[in-house]
Image (spheres, grey):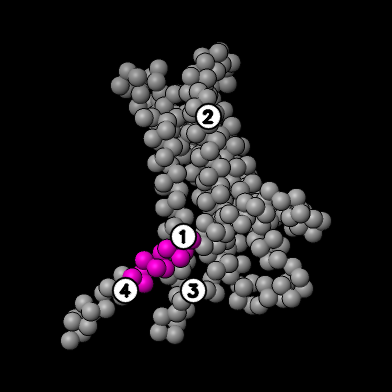
Amino acid sequence: MSAAQGIVDLPDRIWNTLRRWAVAWWRILYLGAVVLVLMLSPSSYNRATRWRLARHMYLETAPILIGHTLLAALLSLVITRIVVVTAQSYGLSRYALEMVIRVLVLELIPLTAALFVAMRATIPNGTQLALMQQSGYFDRLRAHGADPIRVELLPRVVAGVYASVTLAALSCVVALVMAYVGVYGLSLAGLPIYTRMFGHVFTPQITLIFTFKTVFFSLAIALIPMAEGLYADAKTQLNGAPRQLDSELGGLARMFAVLLLIEAASLVGNYY
């Protein structure tokens, strides 16, 4: 009887799942449009908002800057050494450095920077927004004539984007330096060859795709956790229990899905 009831309820479960999926993506797109308008609006940057924005930019970038930079330097040295030794064993040493730059700088560094900022800054900020929403803080802001999205969410989104772009840019520079040191050591003899190879890799098309990918990575990891936190009180309940864990896992799945789609699109643009 229970199996028959489960078969009968299957279309309803599928419909509810699709509806929750569509609503979640619509909220993300809608919030992204709202945040984009607010970011481009000069009225969003009054004195109080500027102070909050500067505070969040510092708190979400400075504490993780040194750690991620050291991690990028170590990762660059290890990957460079592995690729160079492997290429030499197959007689392909002339392609080793170019391969390192393509794999490390073009692909790994932007993704690791975005994930690092997501885990250390934007996901905790999304949880903070959910707690503010549940405690009634947003209602108190509205009662005093303030917009919670402009006051609390916008500085966090902008700071998340800034932190991800900053970490990616600095880590790419460090990775390029470490790749050179890993191949040529501290000598400047290989600098002309290295700069020609760098120009061969970073063509205008590749540079444009790399820039767009880094920015879209930053927007994804900054916006999706905030949307999950902002709409946390709108989540449906199952048997009287809040679906908080399901919501958090769904938000992470959506964020990783967007990152995967961006990475796949950049690979198609770079190599096809």
Q: Which residues are magenta?
A: 15-26
User: Left or right of 187: which side holds 6?
Assistant: left
Question: Which amino acid type is marked by label 4?
Answer: Arg
**Residue 225 appears in the rendering:** no
Q: Which residue position holds label 4?
A: 13
Q: Which residue position holds label 2?
A: 207
Dominant secondary structure, magenta: helix
Number of residues whose C-alpha sits closer than 10 Å to that of mark 3, classed few (under 14), some (14–19) or many (20 or more): some
Element under disc 1 = helix
- Dots 4, 2 in contact, CB < 8 A: no
Element under disc 3 = loop
Query: Gap in Å between the C-alphas at discs 3 and 2?
Result: 41 Å
Which disc is residue 227 wearing? none
Taking 110 as reference, is 88 above or below it? above
Q: Which residue position holds label 1?
A: 25
Q: Residue at x 55, y 69 (%)?
A: 231
Question: Which amino acid type is marked by label 2?
Answer: Thr
